[in-house]
C-alpha cells in the first residue's frame, strides 16, 4: 500500500504543479491576491507529494520490495543498507524522481523563505518553477515511472553497478542535482522578470541566495564526483573531460559568471539584460546536461538510460523551456532599461571581463562536448574529443580568467583610478614572480608549462591576500586594528576571499598533479621494492576476504622514503558476484603535499601481482580548494544583506545597525 | 477499501490545502511590499559603513547614495500604483480543488495498480523458502516446515515430513522431537510409533532406550512390524540376552523376503550372535556364505588365522600406528571366538589415534560390524574408547611418552585419512608440518610430494601448499 500511495503522491505533485503554473499567473492579471497565494500552498503540496513519492520508493528499496520493476533492476537483498538507500537515485527513474524532488524543494523554500519577495514576483517565479516541474513530472510518470509493478516478483534483484556502491558517489548525485536544479530558480526569476518587466537591485538580491546554494552544491557535487573517479577508477586521474563531466562543468562555469554578474545588478543596477540572459543560459546548460546524461545519447559510464523515447521527451522539454525563455527574452528584453553607467576602468568592467572569459570557456567546453555528437548526426563519423583539445583550448582561457580574477578586486565600482590598480598589480606580480622562482629553486622544478601554471595560481593567491590586507588597512594601521577590520568584513567579502583563495589552491593542486605526477606500472613479487619518485613501494602480501556482498583481495603495501617506513596502504580488488563485476579500491595515504596511491591489479599466475603505484603531488590541495569554494558560497549566503527585506524584521533589526 | 480510503483522504487534503488561499477572509495586499525599499535603505547603510571603514571616499559615497536614492524613489512610485485584493471565493476554491483532485486520482487510477499490496522480501519468506526447497535445498525445506508446524501444530503430515527431513541431514535429536509430535498425533499408527522409537535409538547412539523398547513391544503386539521386531531383538542383545536376540532375528529373517532391505543387517547380527554364543551358523542361516561362516568363527582354516594373528600382533608391537592392522586383528580374534580380546584390541588400537576422528570412525564402524557395541552395552570395558574433548585437553598433563604417542596417533590418523580422501590442501599442509615438527623430514617431503601430485595442475592450490609448508621443509 505504501508503494501505491507513493505513486498517487507523485500524481498529486503533478496536479499541484499544474495548478501552481496556471492559477497564480491568472492571479497577477486579475489582481487576485488569493490566486497568487495559491502559488505558495501549491508549492508546499507539490513538495510533500514529491517527498512522499521519494520516501515510498526509498522504503521499497529498504525492504527489498521486488514487486517494483525499478527495485528488481537496481537492488539486491544482500546489498548493504547504505547502498539500498543510495540505490534509489543511482538509476534513471530514481534519479529523475530526485531531480523533481529537488525542484519541489526549491519551490517550497521560496514559498517559505521568500516572504520578503513581493507576492506578484514570488507567485510568478513559483509559476515558472512549476511549469518546469509539470514537464518533468509528466516525463517521469509517462516514460520513466519508478512505481511500475511486476506480476510475479522474482526472489532477488539484479544488483547495482558496483562502481556506484561507494560513499563518494552515493552523495554525488544529490549535490549535483542541488546545483542543476537550483539554477532553475535563477531561470524562474529571470523569466518572472521578463514577464513582470521588473529588474532592479532588489530583484538581484532576492535571486542571489538561490544561485549561491545551487553553485555551492554544484561545486561540491563536481568535486565529489572527481574524488570518486580518482580513488575508485584506479588510474589516479580525477578529470577525464568525459561528456558527462562536461555536462556538469558547463553549468558551473556559466553559473560562476551569473554569480558575478548578479553582483553588478545588485550594486550598480547595470548588466540587467545580460544577467537575465545568463540566468536562462545557466539553467539551459543544466537541462542540456540532464538531456545528455538521461537520453543515453552519450556512451559513457554515467549514461544508463538508453531509451530513445525518453531522449526525445527530454529534448522536447529542452526546446520548450529554453526556446520559450529565449523567445520571451527577445520579445521583452527591449522593455528592460540598461541601468547604471560605468567607465572602462571599473569593477563592473572587471566583472564583465570575468563574464566574457567564463562564457568563452563554457563555449570551448560546449563545442568540445557537442561537436562529436553533431558530426555523428551529420555524417555518421564517430570521433571523441579528448584531453588534448580541452587542455589547449580551455586552459589558456581559464588561466586568463584566473589572472583577471586577481586584478578584479583591485578595481573600485563605477570609476577606478588606473594608476592605483596598475601599482597594486605590479607589486603583486613582483611578489608572485619571486615566489614562483623560489618554489622552482627549492624543489628543482624545470617544466615551463608547470611553472607558468604555478605562477598563475600563486598570483591569484597573492593578489587575493594583497586585497584582503588593503581592506584591513595594512600597512597603515596597527595589526590589532587590521585584525578587527578583517573580522568586521561582511560575509560576502569573506565569500570572495575564500572563493578566490580556494580556486588558487585547487588550481595549484591541478597543475602539480598534472605536471609532476610520478607513476609506475609493473608486475611485482612479494617483498620487492619499486621506486616511485622519492618513495619505495613494497608489496608485502595479498589476503583474500569477503565483504557484505563481494569477495575481495586486500594487499598490504608498505611505502618508505629513504629507508624509513612511512605508511602501509591496503589497496583492494573486489568482485561482486551478483553483478559479476570487479572493482578496484585504491590504497591512498594523504600528506600535505600530495597523495601516495597504490592499486592492486590481477595476479600474474606465478605468485606476482600487477600493481600501479603513484605519487600524486597537489591532489589534497584540489579537494581542499574545492571545499573552500563550496564553503565560500555558504559563507556568502549567511551575509546579513541576504536576510534583509521583510519589513517587520527590518524594524526589529534597526537598533543593532 | 482501506487503500481507497487513504487515497481519497490524501488527495482531499492535498487539494484542500492548495485551494486554501481562496477560503481565507478578505484582505488587501500590497503588490510591492516595501521589501524592495528596505533593500535600498540597507545599501545606503552599507555606504556609510564603507565610508567609516575608509574603503570609499566621501565623493564616491555621495555619488552612490544619489543613485540608490533615485532607485528608491522609483520603487516607491511603483508601491503607490498597485495593490491586490484577496476575496473569499469558495467557488474558485472548489474548482481548483476538484481540478487538482481529479487529475491526481484519475492519473493514478489509469497508471497505478490500486490496492496492490507491498511485497517486501521479509513478508515473502515462505515463498522464498518454497522456491529454494523445490530447488532441492533441504535446509530451506526444514525452515519452511518449521513455519508450517508453528502455524498448524495439529498437522501430522508436516511433523512427519519435518522429522524425515531432519533425519536426512543427520540431525537425529531434532528428528526425535519432530517424530514425537507426529507420534502423538497418530497414536494408533504402528508404523509411526515404530519410526519414532527408531529415531530415539539413532539419537541414542544406536542403543535402545527403555522408552523405545516399550514402544516397540507395544507395536509388536499389534502388528508384525519388522522394524519393531528388529529393535526388540537388538534391545535383548544389548541386555546380554544373546539367545533371545538370536531367536528374534532368526524369526524375523524367516518371515521376511530374502531381498527385504533390512536383511543384510539382520544377517550380520545373526552372525555376530552365533559367534558370541559359539553356535553353528548353518543351523540358523542355512544359506550362509563363506564369508559369513568365517565371520561367525566357523572358518575351516583356523590355524591360518592363528598364524595371521601372531603376525599382526608382532607387527603392531613394532608399529602401533597402522589402524588397518588393528581392525584386522580384532576381526580375526573375533572370528577365532575370542570376542573379549577382540574388543580389547579395538579399544587399544583406538587409543593410539585419540586425536584422529577419521580413524576413530573407522574403529567405530569395525566395532559395529563385529557386534562389539552390543557387548559393550553390558561391560563398559569392552566398548571402543573414543577420546573426548577432555582427553585431548589433558594431553599436556600426560607423561612425555604418552604425549608423543598421542601426537604420533594424530599424525598417523591424518596420513590415513589423506590416503583415502586427498582433497583437502589444509590437511596436507598440517600433515607436512606435523612430520617436520616430529623431525621426520623424509616423511614430510614425501607427504609434500604426494600433496603436489594430488593437486597437479591446480596452480592456486600449489601456491597455497608451497606457502603453507615453506618454513617447515625449507622449500
Image (tube, rainbow, N blue to C red):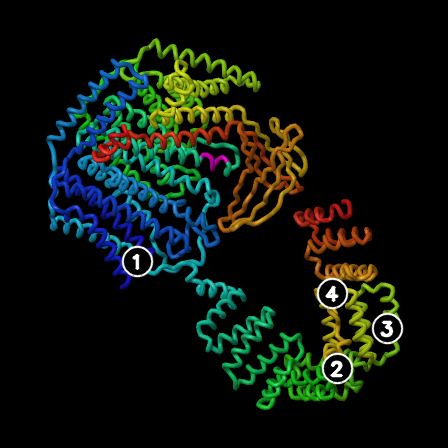
The residue that mark 3 highlights is B309
> Please, which residue is most extreme toward the bottom here?
B221
The residue that mark 1 highlights is B113
- List x then y, in percent, for residue A204: 25, 28
Task: Establish whether labels 1 and 3 are both on one chain.
Answer: yes
The 10 Å Cα crowd at callout 3, few under 14, some 14 to 19, many 20 or more, is: many
The residue that mark 4 highlights is B391
- Left or right: A141 as drawn, with respect to A588: left
- The part of the image, by quadrant, that contains residue B359 is bottom right
Q: Disc 2 and disc 3: Cα gap in Å?
A: 21 Å
Task: Indicate the secondary structure of the residue bearing disc 2.
Answer: helix
Front residue of B2 and A321: B2
Q: Are marks 1 and 4 in contact (CB under 8 Å)?
A: no
Q: Which residues are magenta?
A: A226-230
N-terminal of the two: label 1 or label 3? Answer: 1
Task: Indicate the secondary structure of the residue bearing disc 1.
Answer: loop
Task: Establish whether labels 2 and 4 are both on one chain.
Answer: yes
Instruction: Identify which residue is drawn at 47% across, 69% down.
Output: B147
- Left or right: B235 as drawn, with respect to B5: right
The residue that mark 2 highlights is B271
N-terminal of the two: label 1 or label 4? Answer: 1
Q: Disc 2 and disc 1: Cα gap in Å?
A: 73 Å
Q: Are marks 2 and 1 in contact (CB under 8 Å)?
A: no
Q: Is residue B108 shown above or below A356?
A: below
Mark 3 belongs to which subunit? B
The 10 Å Cα crowd at callout 1, few under 14, some 14 to 19, many 20 or more, is: some
Amino acid at each position: 500500500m505504501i508503494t501505491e500511495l507513493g505513486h498517487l503522491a507523485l500524481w498529486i505533485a503533478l496536479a499541484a504543479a499544474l495548478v501552481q503554473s496556471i492559477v497564480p499567473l491568472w492571479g497577477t492579471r486579475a489582481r487576485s491576491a488569493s490566486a497568487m497565494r495559491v502559488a505558495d500552498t501549491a508549492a508546499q503540496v507539490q513538495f510533500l507529494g514529491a517527498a512522499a513519492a521519494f520516501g515510498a520508493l526509498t522504503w521499497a528499496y529498504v525492504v527489498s520490495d521486488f514487486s517494483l520493476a525499478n527495485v528488481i533492476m537496481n537492488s539486491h537483498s544482500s546489498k548493504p543498507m547504505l547502498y539500498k538507500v543510495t540505490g534509489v537515485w543511482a538509476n534513471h527513474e530514481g534519479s529523475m524522481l530526485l531531480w523533481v524532488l529537488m525542484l519541489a524543494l526549491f519551490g517550497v523554500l521560496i514559498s517559505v523563505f521568500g516572504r520578503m519577495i513581493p507576492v506578484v514576483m514570488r507567485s510568478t517565479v513559483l509559476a515558472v518553477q512549476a511549469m518546469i516541474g509539470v514537464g518533468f513530472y509528466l516525463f517521469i510518470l509517462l516514460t520513466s515511472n519508478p512505481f511500475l509493478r511486476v506480476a510475479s516478483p522474482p526472489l532477488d534483484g539484479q544488483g547495482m553497478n558496483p562502481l556506484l556502491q561507494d560513499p563518494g558517489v552515493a552523495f554525488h548525485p544529490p549535490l549535483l542535482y542541488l546545483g542543476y536544479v537550483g539554477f532553475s530558480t535563477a531561470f524562474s526569476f529571470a523569466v518572472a522578470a521578463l514577464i513582470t518587466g521588473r529588474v532592479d537591485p532588489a530583484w538581484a538580491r532576492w535571486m542571489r541566495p538561490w544561485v549561491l546554494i545551487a553553485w555551492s552544491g554544484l561545486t561540491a557535487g563536481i568535486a565529489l564526483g572527481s574524488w570518486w573517479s580518482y580513488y575508485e577508477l584506479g588510474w589516479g586521474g580525477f578529470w577525464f573531460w568525459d561528456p558527462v563531466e562536461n555536462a556538469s562543468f558547463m553549468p558551473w562555469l556559466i553559473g560562476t559568471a551569473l554569480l558575478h554578474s548578479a553582483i553588478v545588478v545588485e550594486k550598480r543596477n547595470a548588466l540587467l539584460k545580460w544577467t537575465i540572459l545568463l540566468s536562462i543560459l545557466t539553467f539551459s546548460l543544466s537541462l542540456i546536461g540532464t538531456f545528455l546524461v538521461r537520453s543515453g545519447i552519450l556512451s559513457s559510464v554515467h549514461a544508463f538510460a538508453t531509451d530513445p523515447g525518453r531522449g526525445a521527451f527530454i529534448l522536447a522539454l529542452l526546446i520548450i523551456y529554453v526556446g520559450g525563455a529565449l523567445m520571451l527574452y527577445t520579445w521583452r528584453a527591449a522593455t528592460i532599461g540598461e541601468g547604471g553607467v560605468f567607465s572602462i576602468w571599473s569593477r563592473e568592467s572587471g566583472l564583465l571581463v570575468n563574464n566574457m572569459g567564463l562564457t568563452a570557456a563554457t563555449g570551448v567546453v560546449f563545442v568540445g562536448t557537442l561537436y562529436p555528437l553533431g558530426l555523428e548526426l551529420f555524417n555518421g563519423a564517430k570521433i571523441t574529443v579528448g584531453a588534448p583539445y580541452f587542455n589547449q583550448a580551455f586552459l589558456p582561457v581559464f588561466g586568463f580568467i584566473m589572472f583577471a580574477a586577481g586584478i578584479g578586486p583591485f578595481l573600485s565600482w563605477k570609476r577606478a583610478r588606473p594608476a592605483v590598480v596598475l601599482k597594486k598589480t605590479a607589486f603583486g606580480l613582483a611578489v608572485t614572480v619571486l615566489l614562483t622562482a623560489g618554489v622552482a629553486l627549492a624543489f628543482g622544478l624545470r617544466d615551463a608549462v608547470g611553472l607558468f601554471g604555478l605562477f598563475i595560481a600563486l598570483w591569484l593567491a597573492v593578489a587575493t591576500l594583497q586585497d584582503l590586507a588593503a581592506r584591513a588597512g595594512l600597512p597603515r594601521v596597527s595589526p590589532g586594528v587590521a585584525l578587527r577590520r578583517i573580522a568586521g568584513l561582511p560575509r560576502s567579502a569573506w565569500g570572495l576571499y575564500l572563493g578566490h583563495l580556494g580556486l588558487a589552491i585547487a588550481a595549484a593542486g591541478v597543475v602539480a598533479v598534472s605536471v609532476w605526477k610520478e607513476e609506475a606500472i609493473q608486475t611485482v613479487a612479494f617483498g620487492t621494492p619499486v621506486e616511485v619518485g622519492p618513495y619505495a613501494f613494497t608489496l608485502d602480501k595479498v589476503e583474500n576476504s569477503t565483504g557484505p556482498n563481494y569477495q575481495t583481495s586486500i594487499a598490504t603495501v608498505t611505502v618508505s622514503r629513504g629507508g624509513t617506513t612511512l605508511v602501509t596502504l591496503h589497496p583492494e580488488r573486489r568482485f561482486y558476484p551478483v553483478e559479476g563485476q570487479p572493482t578496484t579500491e585504491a590504497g591512498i595515504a594523504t600528506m600535505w603535499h600530495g597523495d601516495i596511491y597504490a592499486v592492486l591489479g590481477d595476479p600474474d599466475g606465478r605468485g606476482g601481482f600487477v600493481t600501479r603505484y603513484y605519487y600524486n603531488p597537489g591532489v589534497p590541495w584540489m579537494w581542499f580548494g574545492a571545499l573552500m569554494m563550496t564553503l565560500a558560497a555558504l559563507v556568502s549566503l549567511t551575509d546579513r544583506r541576504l536576510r534583509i527585506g521583510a519589513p517587520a524584521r527590518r524594524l526589529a533589526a534597526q537598533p543593532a545597525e | 477499501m482501506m487503500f481507497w480510503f487513504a487515497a481519497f483522504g490524501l488527495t482531499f487534503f492535498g487539494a484542500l490545502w492548495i485551494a486554501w488561499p481562496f477560503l481565507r477572509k478578505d484582505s488587501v495586499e500590497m503588490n510591492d511590499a516595501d521589501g524592495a525599499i528596505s533593500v535600498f535603505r540597507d545599501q545606503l547603510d552599507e555606504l556609510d559603513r564603507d565610508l567609516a571603514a575608509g574603503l570609499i571616499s566621501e565623493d564616491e559615497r555621495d555619488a552612490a547614495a544619489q543613485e540608490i536614492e533615485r532607485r528608491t524613489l522609483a520603487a516607491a512610485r511603483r508601491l503607490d500604483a498597485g495593490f491586490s485584493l484577496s476575496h473569499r471565493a469558495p467557488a474558485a476554491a472548489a474548482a481548483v480543488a476538484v481540478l487538482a483532485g481529479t487529475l491526481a486520482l484519475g492519473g493514478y487510477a489509469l497508471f497505478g495498480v490500486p490496492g496492490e499490496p507491498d511485497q517486501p522480501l521479509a513478508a515473502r519468506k515462505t515463498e522464498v523458502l518454497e522456491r529454494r526447497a523445490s530447488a532441492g535445498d533441504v535446509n530451506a525445506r526444514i525452515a519452511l516446515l518449521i513455519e508450517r508446524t508453528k502455524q498448524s501444530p495439529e498437522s501430522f503430515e508436516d511433523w512427519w515430513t519435518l522429522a524425515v527431513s531432519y533425519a536426512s541431514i543427520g540431525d537425529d535429536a531434532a528428528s526425535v522431537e519432530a517424530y514425537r509430535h507426529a507420534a502423538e498425533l497418530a497414536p494408533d499408527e504402528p508404523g509411526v510409533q515404530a519410526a519414532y522409537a527408531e529415531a530415539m535409538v539413532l539419537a541414542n547412539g544406536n542403543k535402545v532406550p527403555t522408552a523405545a523398547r516399550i514402544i516397540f513391544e507395544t507395536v509388536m503386539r499389534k502388528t508384525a512390524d519388522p522394524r519393531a521386531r528388529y529393535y526388540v531383538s537388538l534391545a535383548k542383545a544389548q541386555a546380554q540376552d544373546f539367545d533371545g536376540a538370536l531367536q528374534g532375528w532368526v524369526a524375523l529373517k524367516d518371515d521376511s523376503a530374502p531381498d527385504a532391505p533390512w536383511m543384510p543387517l539382520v544377517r550380520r547380527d545373526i552372525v555376530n550372535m552365533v559367534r558370541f554364543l559359539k553356535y553353528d551358523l548353518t543351523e540358523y542361516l542355512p544359506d550362509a556364505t563363506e564369508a559369513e561362516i568365517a565371520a561367525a568363527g566357523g572358518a575351516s582354516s583356523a590355524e591360518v588365522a592363528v598364524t595371521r594373528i601372531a603376525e599382526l600382533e608382532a607387527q603392531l608391537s613394532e608399529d602401533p600406528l597402522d589402524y588397518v592392522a588393528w581392525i584386522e586383528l580384532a576381526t580375526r580374534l573375533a572370528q577365532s571366538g575370542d570376542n573379549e580380546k577382540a574388543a580389547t584390541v579395538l579399544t587399544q588400537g583406538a587409543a593410539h589415534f585419540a586425536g584422529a576422528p577419521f580413524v576413530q570412525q573407522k574403529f567405530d564402524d569395525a566395532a559395529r560390524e563385529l557386534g562389539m557395541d552390543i557387548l559393550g552395552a553390558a561391560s563398559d570395558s569392552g566398548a571402543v574408547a573414543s577420546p573426548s574433548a577432555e582427553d585431548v585437553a589433558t594431553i599436556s598433563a600426560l607423561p612425555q611418552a604418552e604425549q608423543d604417542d598421542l601426537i604420533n596417533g594424530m599424525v598417523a590418523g591424518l596420513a590415513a585419512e589423506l590416503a583415502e580422501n586427498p582433497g583437502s590442501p589444509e590437511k596436507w599442509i598440517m600433515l607436512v608440518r606435523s612430520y617436520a615438527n616430529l623431525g621426520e623430514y623424509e616423511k614430510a617431503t614425501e607427504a609434500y610430494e604426494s600433496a603436489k601430485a594430488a593437486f597437479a595442475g591446480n596452480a592456486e592450490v600449489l601456491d597455497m601448499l608451497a606457502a603453507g609448508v615453506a618454513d617447515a621443509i625449507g622449500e
